[in-house]
């Protein structure tokens, strides 16, 4: 009896349930068409929404930063890893997010799992949307606060939970701005009103709204005209920004406390210089390129209309994230496999990333897709549809 036999048993159980995951190998940059495991396919599964990870100016800036500062940060930010590239990026971020200050983490995952435990502890209450991202859920766990989950985007339910829970020291409402797997937008105006009424803090994870929504791509908070508020803005530099990293934007006092207490900030090495420079250059492109956002939303509308006309059922998303819900995990993977055979990479998303029985294809478009690539994708969906019945 081998003490590691359970590993194979667990993988076999996942396989049986249609939940086993496999890595694919991407052999090119994340543009509209990629080389996947040696084959060219149209990419409908990238978060590089504006194509900035391959923007020539962004790349040139990153290369230059590597020449000047080297490949790694060489230390945690509180020791020797805090290069001036951080200062430039954080100043730019605060300006973009209309806040006093901003702080960059190594990833969005690290930002959520370290900041939520700074904002709340054992004596506090977190109110979390049912479809919040896994990094928020893990942040709640690490905080040791009491957590109550409100029904997805249900402000009335949120109100009831708040009115029932007045004995806590502090209360924090946390929500995705744009929901990562559904593509819908949180009703932030109403949520903010409720937060203010009940004197609760509000944290918005804008991983998928940043760069895309609002004036100048500033994100979901700006989309609702709430720039001047004390909403705590969290987001990533890994999606529309095309680099890597997470951020928190808010008051200077908030950022000071996070620098002093957030474990995922303190106990990890800083980001590589190339990443910081790329993110900063990308922020400048985002501000000055409304045409990228227009192309993105026009591609999303085009794909959504075409798939609906073909008979596919899409969730009512108003963003670049277009979920085609298929139900059972095996149904989602078999449609994804069929599409891949037609040269379309539309990733299947299964539990625990989405609730049971809502396995889906999560389609995303990019501003840099060509019309021909969108049409090629639609043709793939047209061929595959009959086989899914
Ligand atoms: C991707 C994502 C994160 C994590 O960000 P990374 O930078 O990839 O670690 C956090 N929240 C949401 C909503 C996300 O979609």
Image (cartoon, helix red, strand yellow):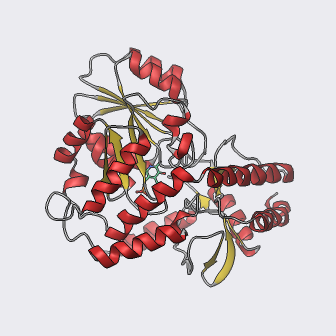
Judging depth in this view, the residue of 213 and 128 nearest the camera is: 213
98 shown above or below 191: below
Q: Position of residue 193 (x, y in %)?
A: 46, 20
Judging depth in this view, the residue of 4 and 295 nearest the camera is: 295
Q: Residue furthest front?
A: 288
264 vs 358, left or right, is left
309 vs 236, left or right, is right
Judging depth in this view, the residue of 60 and 269 nearest the camera is: 60
285 vs 306, left or right, is left
Q: Residue at x 33, y 51 (%)?
A: 90
Counting labels gives 0
Name the image quarter holding residue 388: bottom right
Q: Is residue 138 visible?
A: no
Name the image quarter holding residue 15: bottom right
Q: Residue at x 38, y 66 (%)?
A: 275
306 vs 218, left or right, is right
Q: Position of residue 314 (x, y in %)?
A: 72, 47
Q: Position of residue 172 (x, y in %)?
A: 34, 30
Name the image quarter holding residue 366: bottom right
**Considering the image in quadrants, where does the N terminus appear?**
bottom left
375 shown above or below 290: below
Q: Position of residue 241 (x, y in %)?
A: 48, 57
**Considering the image in quadrants, where does the C terminus appear?**
bottom right
Q: Residue at x 16, y 57 (%)?
A: 78
Q: Residue furthest left?
A: 79
96 shown above or below 42: above
Q: Is residue 170 visible?
A: yes
């Amino acid at each position: 009896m081998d003490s590691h036999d359970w590993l194979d048993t667990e993988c076999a159980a996942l396989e049986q349930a249609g939940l086993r995951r496999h890595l694919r190998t991407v052999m090119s940059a994340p543009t509209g068409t990629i080389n996947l495991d040696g084959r060219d396919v149209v990419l409908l599964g990238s978060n590089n929404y504006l194509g900035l990870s391959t923007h020539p100016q962004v790349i040139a800036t990153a290369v230059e930063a590597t020449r000047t500062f080297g490949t790694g940060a060489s230390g945690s930010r509180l020791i020797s890893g805090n290069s001036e590239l951080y200062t430039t990026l954080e100043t730019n971020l605060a300006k973009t997010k209309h806040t006093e200050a901003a702080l960059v983490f190594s990833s969005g995952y690290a930002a959520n799992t370290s900041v939520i435990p700074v904002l709340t502890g054992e004596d506090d209450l977190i109110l979390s949307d049912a479809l919040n991202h896994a990094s928020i859920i893990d942040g709640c766990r690490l905080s040791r606060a009491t957590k109550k989950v409100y029904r997805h985007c249900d402000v009335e339910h949120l109100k009831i939970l708040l009115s029932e829970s007045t004995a806590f020291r502090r209360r924090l409402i946390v929500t995705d701005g744009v929901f990562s797997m559904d593509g819908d937008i949180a009703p932030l105006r109403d949520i903010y009103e409720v937060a203010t009424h009940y004197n609760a803090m509000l944290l918005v994870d804008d991983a998928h709204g940043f760069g895309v929504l609002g004036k100048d791509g500033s994100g979901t908070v700006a989309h609702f005209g709430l720039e001047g508020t004390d909403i705590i803005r969290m987001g990533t530099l890994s999606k529309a920004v095309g680099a890597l990293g997470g951020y928190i934007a808010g008051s200077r006092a908030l950022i000071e406390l996070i620098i002093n207490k957030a474990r995922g900030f303190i106990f990890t090495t800083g980001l590589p210089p190339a990443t910081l420079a790329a993110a900063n250059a990308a922020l400048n492109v985002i501000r000055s390129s409304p045409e990228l956002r227009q192309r993105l939303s026009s591609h999303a509308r085009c794909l959504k209309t075409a798939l609906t006309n073909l008979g596919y059922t899409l969730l009512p998303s108003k963003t670049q994230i277009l979920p085609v819900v298929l139900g059972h995990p095996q149904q989602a993977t078999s449609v994804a496999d069929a599409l891949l055979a037609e040269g379309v990479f539309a990733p299947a998303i299964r539990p625990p990333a989405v609730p049971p029985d809502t396995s889906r294809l999560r389609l995303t478009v990019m501003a840099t897709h060509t019309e021909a690539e969108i049409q090629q994708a639609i043709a793939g969906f047209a061929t595959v549809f009959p086989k899914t019945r």
